[in-house]
Amino acid sequence: MKKLLNRLSDWWHNRLRLRGLIFKGYGEASKTLKYQLPHFKKCLPDLENYYLATINVILEKPVQFNGYAAITPWIKWKKDYPPESFLFAACEIETKHNRCRAFVYIPSNSPHTASCHKWEVVAESSLPFITTGEEITLIFDYPHYSTKYAACIGGETRI
């Protein structure tokens, strides 16, 4: 019943629901986020309550963002890495077990930025254990997204 009410609420508030699958990433974000977090706190103080790793998602449709919850300046977050800028698009994640707040995390130097289908997501630490291959839904508020003519740099990726 709760899932049905959530879907009705999403429809009523004109939210975009995009299904996707969790895929295995490179494991870099779980190492780098601890260094980046102090810089993010200035623009997104809530990130302190988020899990310090990303969930890698392949979406069923490409999405292009028209607005961001936060955009960082160029940050030199670690000596060995070049400066990098980060974009955060607010969303919610829904799994078969839970729903929580999240952000699509877009580092300027990430290999995932070459595709409008593959995204890294940082979620609240209340999200239960999830696994590679599991279906997930990302929920975006209007007007912060566009799917009709999303311009992708990379090729088409299908689920």
Image: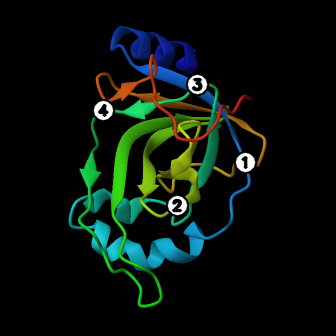
Circles 3 and 4 in contact, beta carbons < 8 Å: no
Q: Earlier in the sequence, mark 1 or mark 2?
A: 1
**Taking 77 as reference, is 149 above or below it?**
above
Amino acid on which the number 1 mark rests in the picture: Phe
Q: Which mark is residue 66?
A: 4
Q: Which mark is residue 61?
A: 3
Q: Residue at x 69, y 33 (%)?
A: 157
Q: Earlier in the sequence, mark 3 or mark 4?
A: 3
Secondary structure, mark 2, is loop
**For residue 109, side relative to residue 29 (left or right):** left
Q: Quadrant of the C terminus?
A: top right
Callout in the foreground (3, 1):
3
Q: Which is nearer the eye, 140 or 83? A: 83
**For residue 137, side relative to residue 8 (left or right):** right
- Number of other residues with Cα within 10 Å of mark 2, as a class: few under 14, some 14 to 19, many 20 or more: some
State the residue position of label 2. 110
Q: Earlier in the sequence, mark 2 or mark 4?
A: 4
State the residue position of label 1. 23
Going by the picture, which residue comes out furthest to the right?
133
- Number of other residues with Cα within 10 Å of mark 1, as a class: few under 14, some 14 to 19, many 20 or more: some
- Number of other residues with Cα within 10 Å of mark 3, as a class: few under 14, some 14 to 19, many 20 or more: some
